[in-house]
Image: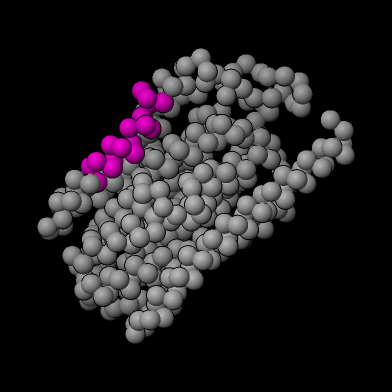
Amino acid sequence: MSHATHANRRLVVRAIKFLILAFIVWWVWQSLHSSIIKLDRSDWTWDWRWLSIAGGWYLVGLLPAGLYWHRVLASLGQHPPLSMALRAYYIGHLGKYAPGKAWVVVLRSGLLRDQGVRAIPAVISVFVETLTMMAVGAAVAAVIGAILLKNQSGVVLGGLFLMVVAGAPTLPPVLNRLFRLRWAAPLFRTQDGEGEGPLPSFHPRISWRLVATGWILNVTGWFLIGISLWAVLRSLVPATEAPFATLPHYTTAVAMAMVAGFLSGLPGGIGVRDGILIVVLTELIPPDTALVATVLLRIVWLMAEVMISGILYLGGMRSKPTPMNSNH
């Protein structure tokens, strides 16, 4: 391939990436704008300092799942730098607000292509990480709901059901059996330089230790995200009406809502996530407070994801690509 042709291909790829990102940002803005209109119609006031804290805790709460995704990539023979994997992970969250769950996969795998990460293992890793996060969230909601929530047997039963649905495909006996099939081997071959042919296939393996690590990390992450919801409530009401001691309740609410929203297939879980969050929150706070908190939470998370994505995207463009898989 000539230098000019290679340069043209890179230009086209960059243009496509930019158009995809621009489309997703536009779609995110539409969702954000509709949420802001809902708030304008209310008479509530809120403390922006607590909302800023909520946005920060949400981003911190996503970090454990991002660290787990990096480990899953390594188990599939893909070794991007941790910084670049986390960059792709956070930016990829914007894809969930566009129609179709494939946008998350497209963003993440596309952003790691310059790091030598192959598309198919990247896609598999995204599904393993995402389904693990959802399974853990459902389990957390079911366990805490069974202990603390009154008249919410649906949360417990729904959590157990969603845990099985999301978690079963991520278990080693299932994934490793699929990896051993004849058609799977070529998907994990790496290239020894441009045009020099494939190296022997890498045999991926998901271990129980890796799964246990993912569950521990994600349990931590869900409680951190629960703090984000608590901070949103603190922006609306005094500490006596939203004590930190009720964090397990907030974690249950946000976990159940996010898992159901994800499995609904709707962009950002719109409607489903919000409805479930309101229902669970009304165990603790008045319905009107729950409604405003739910709308504020969506706005805060959207703004946090857009801001961190912009920072990481622009920062990554200044970094020189360093493919990491050529020696593996």
- Assign the N terminus to one quadrant of the image: top right
Q: Nearer the viewer, residue 279 or 23?
A: 23
The image position of residue 107, as x and y in percent, is: 58, 47
Numbered-mark total? 0
Q: Residue 75: x percent and y percent?
A: 50, 29
Which residues fall within the magenta stretch?
A: 159-175
Q: Residue furthest left?
A: 151
Q: What residue appears at the point 62 percent right and 16 percent down from the top-left corner?
A: 200
Residue 4 visible here: yes
The stretch drawn in magenta includes residue 140: no
Q: Nearer the viewer, residue 243 or 255?
A: 255
Q: Nearer the viewer, residue 270 or 1?
A: 270
Image-based side of 110 in relation to 260, left or right: right
Q: Quadrant of residue 77?
A: top right
User: Vertically, is 140 above or below 76?
Assistant: below
Q: Name the residue: 38% across, 81% down.
A: 41
Q: How is the image coloured?
A: one colour
Instruction: Give the percent coordinates (x, y) of residue 99.
Output: 49, 52
Q: Position of 99 compared to 242: left or right?
A: right
Relative to 42, residue 181 above or below: above
Query: On the rendered structure, is 6 left or right of 280?
Result: right
* Relative depth, front residue between 42 and 51: 42
Would you say residue 316 is visible in this rendering?
no
Picture layout, residue 200 above or below residue 278: above
The quarter of the rendered structure image containing the C terminus is top right
Quarter holding residue 53: bottom left
Which residue does the image show at 62% across and 52% down from the upper left? 20
Name the dominant secondary structure of the magenta segment. Answer: helix
Identified at 28% across, 40% down, the residue is 163
